[in-house]
Image: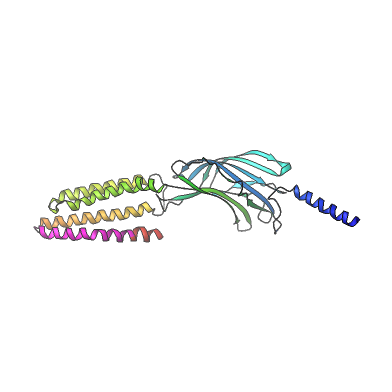
Amino acid sequence: MKAKLLLASLVLILLLSLAFIPPGCSKNEAGASVVKVGVWINSIEKVDTPAQTFTVDFYLWFKYQDIKPDIEFLRGTPRMDLIVEEEREAENYLEYRVRGAYVEPFDFRDFPLDEHFLSVSLEDKNHNITELVFEPDIEESGTDPNLTVAGWDVKDFRIFVTEHAYPDESYSQVTFGLTVYRSKISAVLKNFLPIIIITLISLLTFAISIKNFGQRVGICVSTLMSAVAYHIAALSGLPALGYLTLFDRIMLVVYTVFLYNLLVSVQGMRLVESGKVEQAEKFEAKMQNLLPVLIIILSVIYIGLFGLL
């Protein structure tokens, strides 16, 4: 009877001790302390594409057991104001309010149809993965329902943990953020439609008689200059890039079409000046019929093949 009472007492003590362990905080199989981390993004005020930074405001909390995390932000040089919002040592709970600018290396290969994962990564300063492992608090993490980013649409909040390996040791790394993207309709109307109109104006030269080659060449040259100016203006909001964007590849198609149009006009001019007007008209009609095939081939080469480089 005494043995049963002793066993029942031990079980009760064990259950009571487990009740005081903060939820989600324990030791993993390797013996590392598990720290639950969560985040709530209040706002992203500015996405600075030339500087490749974004301004963010969020709450960050930790539920730990025996190791209090001492964090640092990674990637670039974040200018963060890390303020202790709430700390309950008796409950092993620590919460920060974080505000500031964070560096994000953007990929503009799909500009102006690009999307970017605005992410923040952090690690513990002093404890490697054998001592401390983060675990995302997925249930409570998220973003403000009214969160908007000027000039961008927002989707896909994520928080996850990865192992960050250094030459001598590895650390548990927390990454969280959300995806922003440009509206497809807005991108087409603001970036593609104007250059389409400029190109169509240039191709109107095929409707002008080959005898008026002076007017044809003038229209072709003036629209080409307009296309170049528009190309430069469209990319003015991006940093210096070492690769071609989608818009660059489309503009290569446009420039080649302009060159084709100008070569046809010049060759027609030479035939007219030689008195071969009928031959010039046949040549122009043949080149005009080849134009759709040329555009398709150029699109496959510049947009398709160049996009794989």
Tally of marks: 0
Provide the major secondary structure of the magenta segment.
helix
In this rendering, is residue 145 above or below 13? above
Residue depicted at x 33% and y 49%:
192
Rendering quarter of residue 99: top right
Q: Position of residue 105 (x, y in %)?
A: 49, 50
The quarter of the rendered structure image containing the N terminus is bottom right
Front residue (pair 107, 185): 185
Q: Position of residue 50 (x, y in %)?
A: 44, 45
In this rendering, would 18 be left or right of 199? right
In this rendering, is residue 277 above or below 121? below
Residue depicted at x 52% and y 48%:
178
**Residue range highlighted in magenta:** 274-299
Res. 86 in view: yes
Q: Position of residue 82 (x, y in %)?
A: 60, 40
In this rendering, would 167 be left or right of 218? right
